[in-house]
Image: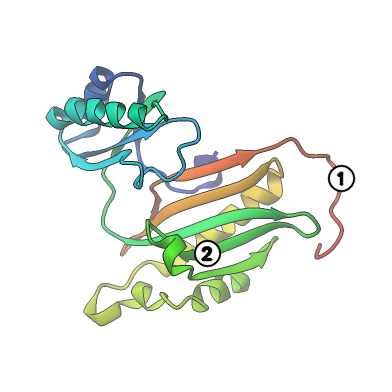
Amino acid sequence: MLSCYGLPVLEQRLAGTPEEAVDAAAELGERVALKAIAPGLLHKTEAGAVRLGLTPDDVAGAAREMDQRLRASGTPPSRFLIQRMAREGVEMIVGVVHDPQFGPVVACGAGGVLAELIKDVSVRLTPLSARDAAEMVDELKTRPLLSGYRGGPARDESALLDAILRVSALVDDRPQVQELDLNPILVHERGVTVVDARARLAAVEPTPLVGAR
């Protein structure tokens, strides 16, 4: 779905067993990320369901260890996700929730595992204009990270703005997407990459909304 709207995602494979995960890792390259998929598992890092920078030789042991840990906690994995390692970048979050009266609300802010702690977020009602997206990013306290904080490289802010507008278009077209979290979306020196995503779908009545529209 994200690729259909021009949102760049990492090349990835699904595997049902640790052995299949090894084969998938070998297809993708030298270093991969391993993630577990389980019903109700939303915060993968906190649950120990993410391992980064693995070689194909490391994947089988990491998958078995992950499987045992998650089963012990009551969330046995149904599958494993193997992704090509992403380039370095600033972690941001772009998300959507539905307001009962006004429809989709798009949010942008500081992402990654500290997103809920920092709570640096800007929101707008859809449909968004290019000016709306730019204002959202400008309002963030962590915006200096994108422009080269303390000698760091400047990031591709225009690619982030483009991603925000594409998310706005997606949820306007697809009202059944009731919630969407792209966290993190990495902003590189050139381009962006969606590293992880969560969507909640629901049936909707095909009636026009009243309010901001």
Identify the secondary structure beneath mark 2: strand
| Label 2, label 1: how far apart the Cα atoms are | 27 Å
Residue 16 sits in quarter = top left
Which circle marks residue 117 in the picture?
none
Residue 152 position in % (x across, y down): 24, 74
In the image, residue 64 lies at what x, y percent? Answer: 24, 25
The residue that mark 2 highlights is: 108
Check disc 1 and give the amino acid type.
Answer: Thr
* Depth order, front residue of 18/73: 73
Q: Residue at x 43, y 65 (%)?
A: 117
* Quadrant where the image shows the C terminus: bottom right
Residue drawn at point x = 14 percent, y = 31 percent: 58
Front-lying residue, 4 or 145? 145
| Percent x, y of residue 110 | 43, 66
Instruction: Say which amino acid is labelled 2.
Output: Cys
Classify 10 Å Cα crowding around label 2: few (below 14), some (14-19), many (20 and above): many
The quadrant the N terminus occupies is: top right
Q: Secondary structure at mark 1?
A: loop
Compared with residue 70, is residue 112 higher up or lower down, i.e. above or below? below
In the image, what residue occupies the spot 31% across and 64% down? 189
Instruction: Work out whether residue 190 or residue 36 is closer to the camera in this orientation and state it.
Output: 36
Q: Nearer the viewer, residue 110 or 3?
A: 110
Mark toward the start of the polypeptide (2 vs 1)? 2
Q: Is residue 78 left or right of residue 51?
A: right
Q: Residues within 10 Å of mark 1 (few under 14, many from 20)?
A: few
Compared with 193, 110 (above or below) is below
Q: Does residue 213 sit above or below 141 in this rendering?
A: above
User: For the point 26% across and 21% down, which residue is it?
Assistant: 18
Q: Is residue 176 visible?
A: yes
Q: Which residue is mark 1?
A: 207
What is the count of numbered marks? Answer: 2
Q: Position of residue 56 (x, y in %)?
A: 16, 29
